Amino acid sequence: MKTVLINGLNSKVGGGLSVLSNLVACLQDRPRECEFLVIAPSRVSLKPSSPNVRRVDVPWYWEHTAFLPLVYSRLLGSLAEKLYCDAILNLADIVIATEIAQVYLFDWAHAIAPRSDIWGRMPLAEWVHQQAKLFFFKRYLGHATCVVTQTETNRKALQESYLLSDVRVVPNAVSLENFSSGEYKDFGLSNIRTNLLCLSHYYPHKNLEVLLAVARLIRRANLPWSIVLTLSAEQGPGAKTLLRAVNREGLTEVLVNVGPVEMKHVPALYEQCDALILPTLLESFSGTYVEAMFHRKPIFTSDRPFARDVCQDAATYFDPLDPHDIVAKIDSVASNRKRMEELTARGSEILKSLPGWSAVTDELLKSLGSAFGKKTNFQLR
């Protein structure tokens, strides 16, 4: 029996947590030909119910940023050796320094955009943290037996930037079960304006500041649009500055902030909005696009390869750095009901073509099988 260590130490929120929890759930019904040992964040409730999947607890300090170099250079590799692991499936942003066969699931887009202007948008503390992480990313990347990423754009960028020989594409699956139902909440949005939902936490790379200039243009042209934000001042100094500017300039009718939204209320928020707008500058794979397709909402987003990978011809694309282009692209579609319906229909078609978690799990297991040098080890179907 082979033993595989799954490193989900940093899978605490969002997409990372979704990958870890869905992967573990899918592994529970697999044949008992392999044992999976799972490292998960201490605050994540992950209780495998299958005898071939069990959780491995590690000291609390392994989760803290200050210990990152020690954890990935020595501790995780040493643990894998003590547990007699034959391979590692690594879901973290940094590769583990070990000679054990390792499949590395890459989804940290900053590593393939070292010259992007998003680095200049970061507060100093975050810039230092990200640069340190990038240093260790580069230092240990060579320990990966193979790299798995979610889009063709990422694959090409990884090969060009780091001269990697074995990079494979396994499309991401998105958990939509939480969006099939939920609790209704009235967000008090106008029913006579077109509500464009920007469903995003504040991060520098999300480029939300451009929406201030967009809002000024909307107000100047007296366009019947509102952009719905889901921000909180607690999301960082950038969020606080943005929200203060909205209030100071009297843009609250155009930039309507409903605050952070609980998952159970997200379906109701989509129901009360007419489209999704996302001016982001950098993504690995944004599940928000897929969620908008699920809720049958047209998408307005950045004309960048990562967006086109997911949305294809189901979105209207704009230059995320040009507020005039953003307004013009929205104006060309928002009042055209037929075009809005075409985008929605195309999004539904793309949604049907996306793999489920079971298929994604099988592909990851095949990559592990290749890392062992035996293609059939994990051919489970």
Image (tube, rainbow, N blue to C red):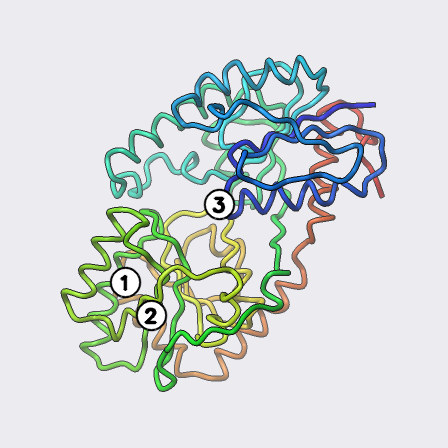
Q: Residue at x 61, y 63 (%)?
A: 350
Q: Please, what secondary structure does the residue beneath circle 3 have?
A: loop
Q: Is residue 348 placed above or below 141 in the rendered structure?
A: below
| CB within 8 Å, label 3 to label 1 | no
Q: Is label 1 in contact with label 2 (beta carbons under 8 Å)? A: yes
Identity of the residue drawn at 44% across and 67% down: 276
Nearest to N terminus: mark 3 or mark 1: 1
Q: Are marks 3 and 2 in contact (CB under 8 Å)?
A: no
Q: Which mark is residue 211?
A: 1
Which kind of residue does numbered mark 2 sit on?
Answer: Ile
Q: Which residue is mark 3?
A: 284
What secondary structure is marked by label 2?
strand
Look at 30% across and 38% down and name the residue there.
Answer: 119
The picture quadrant where one finds residue 326 is bottom left
Q: Tag 2: Cα neighbours inside 10 Å, few (<14), some, or many (≥20)?
A: many
| Marking on residue 227 | 2
